[in-house]
Amino acid sequence: MVRGLEAGGAVHAGVCSRGGTAVQGGSCGLARPSGGRGPSSQIPAGRARRPHPQGLLLCVHVGTGRLRASKAATEVILNVPETRVSPLENGLQVASEDSGLSTCTVGLWIDAGSRYENEKNNGTAHFLEHMAFKGTKKRSQLDLELEIENMGAHLNAYTSREQTVYYAKAFSKDLPRAVEILADIIQNSTLGEAEIERERGVILREMQEVETNLQEVVFDYLHATAYQKTALGRTILGPTENIKSINRNDLVEYITTHYKGPRMVLAAAGGVCHDELLDLAKCHFGNLPSAPEGGLPPLPPCSFTGSEIRIRDDKMPLAHLAIAVEAAGWSDPDTIPLMVANTLIGNWDRSFGGGVNLSSKLAQIACHGNLCHSFQSFNTCYTDTGLWGLYMVCEPSTIQDMVHFVQREWIRLCTSVTENEVARAKNLLKTNMLLQLDGSTPICEDIGRQMLCYKRRIPIPELEARIDAIDAQTIREICTKYICDKHPAVAAVGPIEQLPEYSKICSGMYWRRE
């Protein structure tokens, strides 16, 4: 039985990203995507169906009574444009999908984020992202902003724990200029001392803003306790003392070490000719260094530790907490079953209303018992590990009950989830993935992320087939493997006096066979 992604299939699975650096023009009318971090169950993007000469066939059985009686079915042609991939001699991959639009998104996905930093230079990748648009040897900051504005384009960047991304949205006719600008800011940024000092203050203010976002705070604490004394446990922005001390030499060293051809993907979507993009890549990125003789820096190992962080503040009105177990990495075959299990838990907010028709049993319990203001299940994947769990916002008096029912529902997935529930979750997961892939920017992000994670882009029909292969028995086996008798990571902030002791939380992970 096929259970997951042996070689790929980047679907929305929670790549936590830090956005915020952007240069935007006004005439293109392209919306800026959210750069927020936090659980995006996810992983983290979707695609609209558009006509293309080469269609992919998928048999869809329509479930009306009349068609069932006549044993009829229809074949639907999914006109998914082909994703073309071409490597350069230096190892950089060029990948694109041409959907014939008048606009396009093109970007550089780099296998370099805060995970590749150490305690001394933690925050360098994010600092470097901020410096990208502050001028190059060819363009001053003002010249760069005016050129983007005159194109009606949008230039942006974000940093995550494992990736750094620079991308541009523009009219298709401006693809050559967009690629040339990306190449210029990546390879020729001046990194002037005055700009570094000015941006240092910007990042410190950004850190203050992040500290007011309790979801961001909780997830940073969750990583800190789950991946203690490892690179994944550090924040993306880095500590205040590092931000105050990072200098030009640190930025240059990071670029020299990590910005290599084999660690990069030039991805594009929308109105893009692949052959033209390949020629542009050869022209502007062909001189990027390839892997050094000693090879690329190894991925720092990050081990999971069941533990907790509690920050009690009784002055806060609500408690914010997250509980998670170690999950599978991107290419692990267990990833897809865990995504289905994540969909089974679902999410809920008081604004949703309630009733017996809520698909999530936990949502029904939370609604009828008034146990929380909101909760969100998440499945955050990294290269070789992940976090599968739930984030919740509760009244102080309902924390204990909410944690109890969360763990009870997790154990139910291990023991008695039904085929009907799994079928509904699979349909919802497939629908969400397709709806998220709407527009050139999410498609481009999907291409770039998959190429870094899997070295290929998984066709939608293949991904759907792997989801369809999952049944209730698969969910029970996988959830038992990752949940039962495991010590979770817990992070809680606010009035958390009623949060059970860690030993009691651990006891809730056991299956009591009564």
Image (spheres, rainbow, N blue to C red):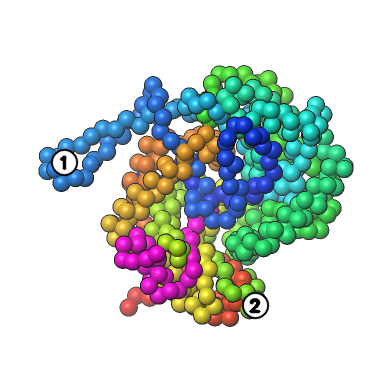
Q: Nearer the viewer, residue 314 or 447?
A: 314
Q: Residue at x 27, y 57 (%)?
A: 420
Q: Is residue 441 above or below residue 393?
A: above
Give the crowd class for mark 1: few <14, some 14-19, many >=20 residues within 10 Å: few
In the rendering, at what x and y percent does residue 9 appear?
46, 41
Q: Looking at the picture, how far across and down is residue 103, in whole percent?
A: 55, 28
Q: Secondary structure at mark 1?
A: helix
Which of marks 2 and 1 precedes in the sequence? 1
Q: Nearer the viewer, residue 209 or 312?
A: 209
The type of residue carrying mark 2 is Lys
Disc 1: which residue: 67
Magenta span = 353-380
Can you tell which quarter of the image residue 365 is in?
bottom left
Numbered badge on residue 96: none
The residue lying at 38 percent from left, 58 percent from top is 344
| Residue 193 drawn above or below residue 352 | above
Q: State the mark number for residue 315.
A: 2
Which residue is at a point 85% across and 47% down the rendered structure image? 197
Q: Residue at x 59, y 42 (%)?
A: 32
486 to 250, vertically: above or below: below
**Crowd class of label 2 (few under 14; some 14 to 19; many from 20; radius 10 Å):** few
